Amino acid sequence: MELYNENREYHAGDIVYIFYRNPHAQDVANIQAAAVVNNPENSNELALFLYETYYPLSSEMAIYSTEEEAEQAYHYYYGNDSEGTLE
């Protein structure tokens, strides 16, 4: 199983980086590592596994292959504060 996203190919087992909004404070976003896994609800799809939850992986998601790439995008979209650092 694989998914192409902006000329990248993802496979189950890959670690990627995404922006994750705090559900308790919607104005706070952080960079978070997530695992690409086989979707347990649909074996023909991939999913992101983050905080014990599966999120269907789609080409509409902003996914970064490295933490550095995610940090650059974070600073571009959110400014130069320190909120984007991986925790």
Image (tube, rainbow, N blue to C red):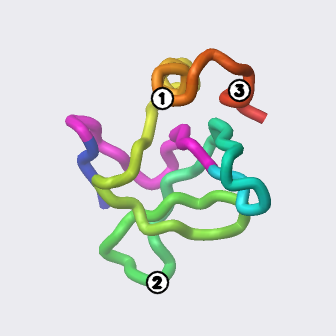
Give the alpha-carbon distance from disc 1 to disc 2, as whole Å.
33 Å
When asked about the image quadrant of residue 1, the answer is bottom left
Give amino acid for label 3: Thr
Spot occupied by residue 30 in the image (x, y as percentages of width and height): 67, 39
Give the residue pinned by disc 3. 85
Give the residue pinned by disc 2. 41
Spot occupied by residue 17 in the image (x, y as percentages of width and height): 55, 38
Q: Is residue 85 magenta?
A: no
Q: Is residue 37 left or right of residue 7?
A: right
Question: Which residue is pictured at 68% across the width and 54% down the height?
Answer: 26
Spot occupied by residue 29 in the image (x, y as percentages of width and height): 65, 42
Give the alpha-carbon distance from disc 3 to disc 2, as whole Å.
31 Å
Question: Which labelled disc corresponds to residue 18?
Answer: none
Q: How many numbered discs sit on the rendered protein?
A: 3
Q: Are marks 3 and 2 in contact (CB under 8 Å)?
A: no
Question: Which residue is pictured at 43% across the width and 68% down the height?
Answer: 56
Badge 3 crowding class, 10 Å Cα cut-off, few under 14, some 14 to 19, many 20 or more, is: some
Q: Nearer the viewer, mark 3 or mark 2?
A: 3
Comparing 84 with 24, the one in front is 24
Magenta-highlighted residues: 6-20
Circle nearer the N terminus (1, 2): 2
Q: Nearer the viewer, mark 1 or mark 2?
A: 1
Q: Is residue 62 left or right of residue 49?
A: left
Give amino acid for label 2: Glu
Give the residue pinned by disc 1. 77
Give amino acid for label 1: Tyr
Q: Secondary structure beneath disc 2?
A: loop
Comparing 47 with 85, the one in front is 85
> What is the magenta segment's predominant secondary structure?
strand
Q: Is residue 58 above or below residue 16?
A: below
Spot occupied by residue 8 in the image (x, y as percentages of width and height): 28, 37
